Image (cartoon, rainbow, N blue to C red):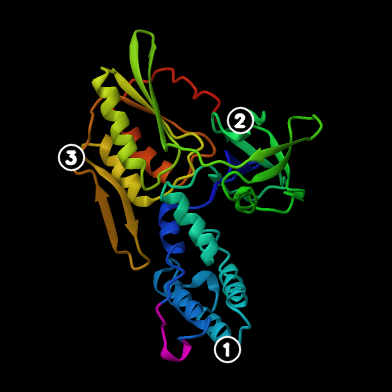
Amino acid sequence: MAHSFFRLHRSPVALIGSAIATALVTTLLPITPAHGEFEDSPKVVLDEAWQIVNREYVDDTFNQVDWDAARQRLLGQEYSSREAAYRALEQELRRLNDPYTRFLDPQQYLELTDQTAGEVSGGRATTASGSDSRDIIVTEVIGDSPAARSGLRAGDRIVLVDGQSTARLSVSGVAQLLKGAENSQVTLTFARGDGQPRTVILTRARIDLPTVDFALRETSNHRIGYIRLVEFNAHATEEMTAAINSLTEAGVDGFVLDLRGNPGGLLSASIEISRLWLRRGPIVLTQNRSGESEQISANRTSLTDLPLAVLVNNRSASSSELSLVPCKTMTARWWWAPPPTAKP
């Protein structure tokens, strides 16, 4: 399966989500039956999901929702399909009025795991809420991709995909339309600024999309190791390790870690990467609704003690925020950081 060749977001961006919340979300698709009588029924998923929320939800008042009654409603109905059961579960979760608790159907879960595995070429997207705008905005065009060769640029608005309007589609919905078999074609209509929409035909291709970009930059008699991390996926730690080692061998005086536009990703990757920078001290503290807490700390496996500056913007979220806090406690001189070429 080949994928899109640029990154998208809803404009303006208002990121939601956290590494801990993502961990909860991804557990909402167990397949082990909770009760034998439901073994061949969609009610398996409903009951398992209900129990996870009942056990893990931080607010033990469930935002004043009668959660026991929610279980009765879910299991008291008959469902014509699994999709109908999923919709019923989504409705009950919406009663909690909690943007961090949501249900992923199998296709959505597959897309999430594909992305966090670091094996999907392009199509990384961020989500937005609380905006009247429904524009789908290209935030980055991958170099030497079909999109780049067709003239698409960061900031362009995607209007149509194969003739279908993006006005009522989510970012993931647009990304799904852009996916297809390698060498197949997709017709894309986009607009730039106040100009007229332009239509191009793209031939899908599989491209290599690294998680980490790095370079040696010299400014004001300083040799700066510039590292940009796109997201915290399964390959991020090994790529970050290689970048730090390579720049250290090149004799840098300090580092700039660019987390602008990074929507987060795996909590485990964020912890591992924080440990590459921090020699000691806490990284993250989790606390459940009973007040029991668990602190995860650095373990003296840092690769450098050189000064570090961290760059963020309004689209740095989740694990980016988690990684930023301990890094800010480091003693650091602050230098001018060169912006990434053709990147947000």
Residue at x 62% of width, y 72% of height: 87
Callouts 1 and 2 close, C-beta under 8 Å: no
Residue 103 seen by the camera: no
The local secondary structure at tag 1 comes to loop
Q: Check disc 3 and report the residue beneath it.
A: 300
Q: Residues under labels 2 and 3: Cα distance?
A: 43 Å
Tell whether position 34 is magenta.
yes
The local secondary structure at tag 2 comes to helix
Three-letter amino acid code at the position of disc 1: Gly
Residue at x 62% of width, y 34% of height: 147
Residue at x 68% of width, y 47% of height: 131
Q: Position of residue 185 (x, y in %)?
A: 66, 44
- Residue nearest the observer in this picture, 150 or 52: 150
Magenta-tinted stretch: 32-38
| Viewer-nearest of discs 2 and 3 | 2
Chain-order first, disc 2 or disc 3: 2
Q: Residues within 10 Å of mark 3 (few under 14, many from 20)?
A: few
Residue 136 seen by the camera: yes
Three-letter amino acid code at the position of disc 2: Ala
Vertical placement of 321 versus 340: above or below?
below
Q: Residues under labels 3 and 1: Cα distance?
A: 53 Å
Q: Position of residue 252 (x, y in %)?
A: 29, 18
Q: Position of residue 164 (x, y in %)?
A: 75, 51
Q: Residues under labels 1 and 2: Cα distance?
A: 53 Å
Q: Check disc 1 and report the residue beneath it.
A: 76
Relative side of 66 to 306, left or right: right
Label annotation for residue 148: 2
